[in-house]
């Protein structure tokens, strides 16, 4: 890699992993972790009282938030209550409050004072011999993050100039949503994975992105003239005319190709020899419902409802959910909209989630969280049931790893139905309930799951992560994380066979469904439904229409007999 000092105005090239296609030309905005969080400049004396009251208000808001949370969960989750109460005690601690206040009086911003003081105390607890005190360090860190996010809610964090290209160490799904609203043109990150939720959102929003660019934050300078090539994963700084010309023409070819695909929107999704494949869309954001309808999606195979939490920055009320779901359900009608209940946790964090976790992807996520927070789960089930009266709604459970999770969810759904019935609300009494097959455990007990449910949807993003023990958000294991691994292909086949034996439909809603090399293979494995991002739908339809089932089945058989992903890739002509 080139050094930034010796080649200031010469073309520099950085290599990364392409994670969202497209070309963007703009100016770098560097987000060092601390600049995302708080302004570093000294606060002038006249602003000190404002900073003090911002801090006091943030503490007050957080204490109220914790109190409300305790009220909601006290009957059902005693362990969670004691964690929240400990957090309330910490945040109300007079000494801690005085120490932060002192720092603000000495000219630090509220955010800076919180970070400095909490980190100082954390260091002290972290090195204690006492296990309980060491836990305190974790609590302090968690509360610090909460306070910062309350403070951030109250301040206009960053004013992005036009043509901004964000360069950061890593970005969360909520950053992507926020930065998209601010008009950011492209993203460059040092860490991340192509199947992370942040990458999925960038692709959904059609914002070019490149991940895994080593030292991007230190090598690129604020204001640098960048070109991001989301096709190849290259970043150019101070590009030469020829590079610029080549990339601009590549972008225009891409756009022409996308436009040409438009004519496929009205054509049916079927193979050359007439097998119908239901081609649906994944919905991450309300706007996607319109984009999906425009490209002719046959309904929505996965609505990631937890994105509503992330964009609102709180758990939505039943009414807020009802309004959001209703718009999506109406947009899909008469086709189906599949609402996956909140798959919060892992790389999608939300306020009110109680604990810091060492391995969040293996932790308190999806159905595990919902079954502990029945108040939240019930409000969501009720909202989904209330939009189901036109009978075009399915309800899907994420992160299932055992039968009890399904049984308990169904019990709660039935309870919600009888409450709604008593309240004379109309709903679909036979709403199909399905599960995501995204853990190896779910694959192995698929026959039992099929007895309880009406459809399967294979989540290959997580199935790959959990089967290959490779974090989907970690570029260091990007070469291990591979949905074309023979184990994944075999698990898809096992799931399809079980579903068909039980006469229930099976779809794929992971990124593999929209991959340019997978279509024929998945058709050959017998998948009934594909659900892909709206931006990938027409390309996928084109490939489905080019597929010959007989050849696809032969291809699938060969893939099932392959011993390595390299063999499978050769079979599929991938480079
Ligand atoms: C998956 O895991 O494949 C999936 C579709 O769900 P998500 O990407 O939201 O985890
Ligand atoms: Mg998943």
Image (cartoon, rainbow, N blue to C red):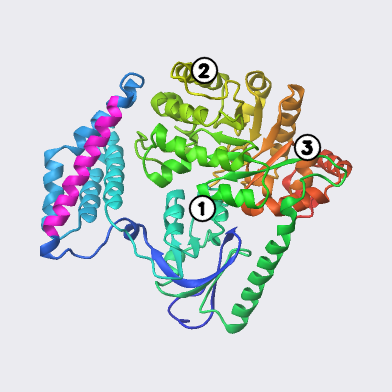
Of labels 2 and 1, the one closer to you: 2
Q: Earlier in the sequence, mark 2 or mark 3?
A: 2
Question: What is the crowding at mark 1: few (fewer than 14 residues within 10 Å), some, or many (at least 20)?
Answer: many
Q: Which mark is residue 467?
A: none
- Residue 484 seen in this snapshot: yes
Residue 524 picture location, percent across and down: 81, 40
**Numbered disc 3: secondary structure:** helix
Residue 50 lies in the magenta-colored region: yes
Where is mark 2, residue-wise?
414
Residue carrying label 1? 192
Return the mark for residue 525: 3
- The residues bearing labels 2 and 3 have C-alpha atoms spaced at a distance of 34 Å
* Residue 305 seen: no
Tell me if label 2 and label 1 are in contact, CB under 8 Å: no
Left or right? Give the position of 53 relative to 132. Answer: left
Nearest-to-viewer mark from 3 and 1: 3
From mark 2 to mark 1, how far is it between C-alphas? 40 Å
Say whether residue 149 is left or right of residue 7.
left
């Amino acid at each position: 890699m080139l050094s930034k000092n010796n080649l200031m105005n010469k073309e520099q090239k950085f290599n990364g992993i392409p994670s969202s296609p497209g070309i963007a030309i703009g100016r770098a905005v560097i987000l060092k972790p601390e600049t995302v969080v708080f302004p570093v400049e000294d606060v002038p004396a006249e602003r000190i009282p404002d900073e003090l009251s911002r801090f006091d208000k943030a503490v007050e808001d957080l204490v109220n938030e914790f109190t409300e949370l305790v009220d909601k969960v006290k009957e059902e989750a005693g362990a969670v209550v004691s964690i929240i109460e400990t957090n309330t005690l910490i945040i109300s601690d007079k000494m801690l409050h005085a120490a932060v206040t002192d720092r603000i009086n000495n000219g630090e911003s509220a955010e800076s004072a919180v970070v400095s003081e909490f980190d100082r105390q954390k260091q002290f607890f972290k090195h204690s011999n006492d296990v309980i005190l060491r836990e305190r360090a974790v609590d302090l860190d968690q509360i610090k993050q909460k306070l910062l996010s309350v403070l951030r809610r109250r301040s206009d964090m960053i004013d992005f100039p036009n043509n901004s290209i964000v360069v950061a160490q890593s970005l969360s799904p909520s950053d992507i949503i926020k930065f998209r609203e601010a008009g950011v043109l492209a993203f460059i990150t040092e860490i991340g994975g192509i199947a992370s939720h942040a990458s999925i959102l960038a692709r959904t929003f059609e914002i070019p992105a490149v991940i895994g660019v080593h030292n991007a934050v230190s090598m690129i300078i604020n204001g640098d003239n960048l070109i991001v090539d989301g096709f190849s994963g290259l970043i150019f700084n101070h590009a030469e005319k020829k590079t610029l010309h080549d990339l601009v023409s590549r972008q225009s070819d891409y756009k022409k190709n996308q436009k040409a695909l438009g004519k496929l929107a009205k054509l049916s999704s079927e193979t050359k020899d007439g097998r119908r494949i239901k081609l649906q869309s994944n919905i991450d954001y309300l706007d996607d419902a319109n984009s999906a309808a425009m490209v002719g999606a046959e309904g929505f195979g996965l609505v990631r409802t937890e994105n509503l939490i992330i964009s609102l920055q709180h758990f939505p009320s039943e009414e807020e959910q009802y309004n959001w779901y209703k718009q999506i359900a109406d947009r899909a009608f008469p086709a189906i909209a599949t609402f996956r209940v909140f798959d919060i946790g892992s790389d999608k964090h939300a306020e009110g989630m109680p604990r810091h976790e060492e391995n969040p992807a293996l932790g308190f996520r999806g159905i595990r969280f919902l079954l502990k927070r029945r108040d939240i789960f019930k409000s969501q089930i009720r909202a989904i049931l209330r939009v189901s009266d036109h009978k075009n709604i399915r309800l899907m459970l994420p992160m299932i790893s055992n039968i009890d999770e399904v049984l308990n969810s169904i019990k709660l759904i039935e309870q919600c139905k009888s409450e709604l019935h008593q309240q004379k609300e109309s709903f679909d009494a036979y709403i199909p309930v399905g599960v995501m097959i995204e853990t190896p455990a779910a694959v192995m007990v698929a026959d039992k799951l099929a007895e309880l449910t009406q459809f399967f949807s294979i989540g290959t993003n997580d199935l790959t992560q959990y089967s290959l023990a490779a974090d989907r958000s970690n570029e260091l294991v990007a070469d291990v994380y591979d949905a074309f691994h023979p184990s994944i292909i075999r698990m898809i086949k096992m799931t399809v066979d079980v579903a068909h034996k039980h006469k229930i439909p099976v779809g794929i809603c992971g990124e593999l469904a929209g991959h340019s090399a997978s279509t024929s293979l998945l058709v050959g494995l017998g998948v009934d439904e594909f659900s892909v991002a709206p931006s990938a739908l027409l390309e996928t339809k084109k490939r489905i229409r080019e597929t010959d089932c007989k050849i696809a089945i032969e291809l699938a058989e060969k893939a099932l007999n392959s011993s390595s992903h390299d063999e499978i890739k050769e079979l599929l002509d991938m480079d």
